Amino acid sequence: MQFINPVEILELDTSEISAVDNSLIKKAKRKLFAEIDLSDNGHFQYKGLSLTKTDCEKVIDELESPNALEFYSHLAKNNLLNDFLVNGNDKLFTSFKQESIYKLLEFIKFISPFFAPKFDKAILKAFVDEDSEKLRSILRTQTLISTADLNVAFKSLSIEIQNRIQQIDSLTKEIKNEESEYSDDDIDEVIDLIVDLFPTETLNQLPAYFQSQINKIAAAINFLLLAIWNEFNTTSVSLHLLEHLLELNIESVSKPTFQKNYDIVKKKHEERIEQEKNAPTLKKWASILITIQNLIKSVENKNVQASDSLDKIKQIVTLTELNALPSFANEIRTQIGYSIRSLSISCWNKQNDIKSSLALISFALQINVSDDAKLKFKQDKTELEELEKKYKGVLVCHFCEKNPPEDNCGISQTIYKETYRSYFPRRVQFSYTDVTIPRCRSCKEIHSKGSQKFSLIFFVALALGVIIGAMTDGEHFIIGGIIGAVAGWIVGKIIEGNQVSSSGIKDSSESTLSKHPLLIDRMREGWTFSKPSA
């Protein structure tokens, strides 16, 4: 729809509106048509337009309406607005001033169909050029657009924004599907792309008409940054995109989510910076973590004894140093804690060493791990303590109370219980059973050394007693042997006891065995180590 001001083409712009009547209009019309007839091409040149008689006659007929005459006359004197309606001359925006006639709904309805399309082109150009000052000036004139023409006035800009949103949606899809041309080396270029496509300064000037699209822009950027977060080894790109997103004037229920995402990404980005700064320290502890993993395999393969595992952990993990590391090491601390827990489990599952397992989980509890991890470690420790209590003397050697029992190292002991006795005639009936008392190899060796010393001393004393008795009186060698045997037994037992006690373990005497968890209840029920006799 082309705007033509009949007052101008009839050259009535200098006349007072009260003087303009039908006769004046007809006279001016005849003059205009004569000029057209005399022209070379039969057209009238008007502000760059080439008008035919039909074009002119159509708009001249509108002057029959008093309102139209008044409005055209006003526009003829308001050159800036008039020229904008004719050919879109944008000088209007730099010198626009509100006038009382702009408050008339009839006037707005009159010019709006012509104003809206020109406004549409002007606002699109200002947005594309990112000319914030020009855009602000253009938007001051939107009062000249009727509600019915808003879709026309904002159509081109709305399409432009939608096309840009679709461009970002397509990029997000490509990144998710791993079809994007971006790599870790150049993904940061996406930041410039978003800034160029969605300049916050110009977008934030747009009226409420565009609020829905601004919300969609924010959502599109959010989906893009999440895709980048998941697919690329970077936090800075997502952080910058979120910063740009939050600069938009968003009115959406998703805004708290955007803010939450920003807080999460910012924290992770700060941790990443801290990690890069402390890379040498992290590398050291990562190496320690690998060492622990190798130790777990050695324990599982029984190349390393479970009882040695705690000492090895203490050699490679300095608790004070590990716990003193800043927050950037939270993850490595937790990984080390869980690795020591795995070592604890291996000591129990593969070597049945509950003492070492408990010691290791207690060590892990001293590490400043997350609350969830610490709770898990405490649960493990409680379960192990309950097992240790329930199977006391079975899971841990009764004699040293340190090492796990080992195969072929136990003490086999026969116990008896009298079931019937009569005196006339004298006879006794009894039950018996063989019980194996679990024992570790170390305690077996210590007990064996004590027994060997006892045997040696006993037989030496016996021999000496026999020899001495024979020398004093040949018939007294038996008495000498008895005296030597008694003395050897006493001295041998003392030395055997010293051998065991100096090693810090319990002896293997019947009095000690009777207190073993496997036997103590049976002893109370009447079982003995001595075979009942009639």
Image: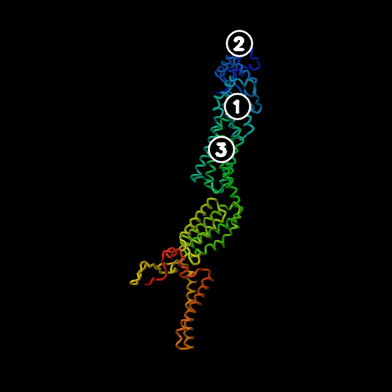
The single residue placed furthest to the front in the displayed view is 424
Q: Earlier in the sequence, mark 2 or mark 3?
A: 2
The residue that label 2 is drawn on is 23
Q: Crowding at label 3, few (<14), some or many (≥20) Cα neighbours within 10 Å?
A: some
Q: Is label 2 in contact with label 3 (beta carbons under 8 Å)?
A: no
Determine whether 346 is above or below 229 in the image: below
The residue that label 1 is drawn on is 142
> Residue 304's spot in the image, x, y percent?
50, 65
Foreground tag (3 vs 1) = 3
The quarter of the image holding the N terminus is top right
The residue that label 3 is drawn on is 255
Q: Nearer the viewer, residue 522 or 382?
A: 522
| Left or right of residue 533, residue 288 in this image | right
> Residue 419's spot in the image, x, y percent?
36, 66
Q: Nearer the viewer, residue 76 or 353?
A: 353
Q: Crowding at label 1, few (<14), some or many (≥20) Cα neighbours within 10 Å?
A: some
Residue 77: image tag? none
Q: Nearer the viewer, residue 25 or 347?
A: 347
| Left or right of residue 286, residue 14 in this image | right
Circle 2: residue type: Ser
> Residue 363's spot in the image, x, y percent?
55, 58
Circle 1: residue type: Gln
In the rendered image, which quarter is residue 438 located in? bottom left
Circle 3: residue type: Lys
In the rendered image, which quarter is residue 104 located in? top right
Q: Is label 1 in contact with label 2 (beta carbons under 8 Å)?
A: no
- The type of colouring in the image is rainbow
Foreground tag (2 vs 3) = 3
Q: SS class of the residue under badge 1?
A: helix
